[in-house]
Amino acid sequence: MRKTSYPDIIIDAIARRRIVELRYKGIKRRVRPHILGYAGEGALALSAWQIAGTGSGWRLFHVDEISDLAQTEAGFRSPARGYNPNDPAFSRIIERL
């Protein structure tokens, strides 16, 4: 059985509007994923509204620095305030709300 990649998990979570749990810079976090794409110098990144971990608010996570990523059964209905589906931080978007 093929292990599901982190980008695949994130794409599915965005499409299904599911909260994900992840570890980033050693800290466990819960986030509402909004955009997966290539940011800055071409790094694959996740733009998400963090709801637990180091406070709440918008965060940009480099996917190659994420560990212990899992989609939860908890969902969310609408984008977080301030959501920009055409976020200029991204040069190419793979998936978005």
Image (tube, rainbow, N blue to C red):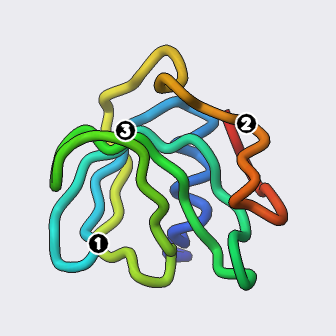
- Kindly identify which residue carries mark 3: 19
What is the x, y in percent for residue 14? 58, 40
Q: Nearer the viewer, mark 1 or mark 2?
A: 2
Residue 75, percent from left and from top: 39, 25
What residue is drawn where x is 28% and y is 53%? Answer: 21
Q: Secondary structure at mark 2?
A: loop
Q: Residue at 54% of width from left, 59% of height from top? A: 46
Which of the numbered marks, if any, corresponds to residue 24?
A: 1
62 or 72: which is nearer to us? 62
Residue sticking out furthest to the top:
77
Whether residue 66 is situated above or below residue 30 in the rendered picture: below
Relative to 53, 14 lies left or right: right
Q: CA distance from mark 3 to mark 1?
A: 15 Å
Name the residue located 35 percent from the left edge and 64 percent from the top edge: 69
**Element type at mark 1:** strand
Quadrant holding the C terminus: top right
On residue 85, the disc is 2
Amino acid marked by disc 3: Ile
